[in-house]
Image (cartoon, rainbow, N blue to C red):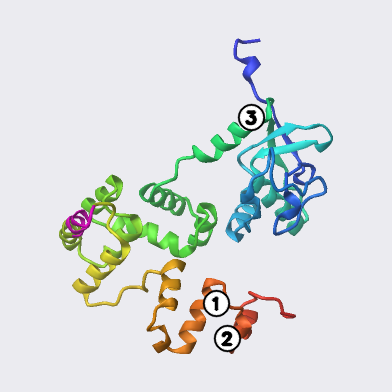
Amino acid sequence: MSSNDKNRLTAYQFDPFEITIVGGKNMPEGGGPNDTDATDGPGYDARILRPLTEVSIRDVIDQGILVPVLLRKDGKAGKVVWDGRNRIRRARIVQTRTGKPCPVPCVYHQGTDQDFRKKQAAANEHRDEDFFANKAKKCLDLRKGGSTDEQIAVTMNCTEAAVANYFKYFELDQSVQDAMKSGDISGSAAIKLVELTRAEQATELVSLVAEQKAKGGGKVKVAAAAQRAKQKTGKKPEGAVRPGLRVMGKVIAHEKAEELPEGFVLGMRWVMGDLPPEKIKGLKAILKDLYLVDEDG
């Protein structure tokens, strides 16, 4: 036995329905046979209440669960997950949908409740967020390897439109790419400059960064870059920046809101969540056609 053998972790594979998710009975898709209905306490994480994305489920269908989850043996509760709840959720959905086993790689850890709270928090909060240029390079490597854009979207956990934007990175002038890496301009703002020549991109970047610094610093905003591209090309930007709910609320509450078309105001209230779709004529039918509401209402 080497001096490091005592620190080795043995990975096991378990059926996802064998594992206990604390509070799992409250999940949108329903819980497993061993899940609890707790809404707080050791092992609970409110993020299990968020719906899973279809693209993340398709990735598990394609590749299975790649990263082991962290378990703790807990008496009658059995195998309790402390990190990796959503991996287990995806595996359950895939197993149910395909009718084929989708085993989850797992490792056991020991410790007090506080030890596990620290492990749980650290596992989630210390993950480095990937940056635009790195994601673009990964997309390019996947395409070179033979993946379609649809397959790349599944692997990268994004939409095909996002994949298309990552490829636009390679059409940017080097100065713009460098500005993205240094934090002077965001990736979503930078790609708005793609329609310009590389020389124009470099020139407009200098101006945009200077304007942003004059406003107090920070990254160049999407709206500013889109407007600059529109001015140079004479083309209309691809859509406007979506306002936040707080902004929409202020618009509706403004004294001049009554001058706006009724349909516009009703639509804003529906988006904000304070008006049901049946209050807007024709909207419920559209939602049914898109399978966004049940046929029975």
- Residue 266 locus on image (x, y percent): 51, 83
Whole-angstrom CA distance, mark 2 to mark 3, is 50 Å
- Looking at marks 2 and 3 on the same chain, the residue that comes earlier in the sequence is marked by 3
Which residue is at a point 18% across and 59% down the rendered structure image?
211
Tell me which amino acid carries mark 3: Gln
Which label sits on residue 280? 2
Q: Are dots 1 and 2 in contact, CB under 8 Å?
A: yes
Locate residue 191: give its quadrant. Answer: bottom left
What residue range appears in magenta?
Answer: 208-216
- Residue 158 locus on image (x, y percent): 50, 58
Whole-angstrom CA distance, mark 1 to mark 2, is 8 Å
- Callout 2 environment at 10 Å: few (<14), some (14 to 19), or many (20+)? few
Which label sits on residue 46? none
The relative height of residue 271 versus residue 60 in the rendered view (above or below) is below
Front residue of 58 and 271: 271
Which residue is at a point 73% across and 54% down the rendered structure image?
26
Looking at the image, can residue 64 be seen? no
Whole-angstrom CA distance, mark 3 to mark 1, is 43 Å
Secondary structure type for disc 1: helix
The relative height of residue 65 versus residue 192 in the rendered view (above or below) is above
Which residue is at a point 71% across and 79% down the rendered structure image?
297
Which label sits on residue 114? 3
From the image, tell me which residue sits under label 1.
270
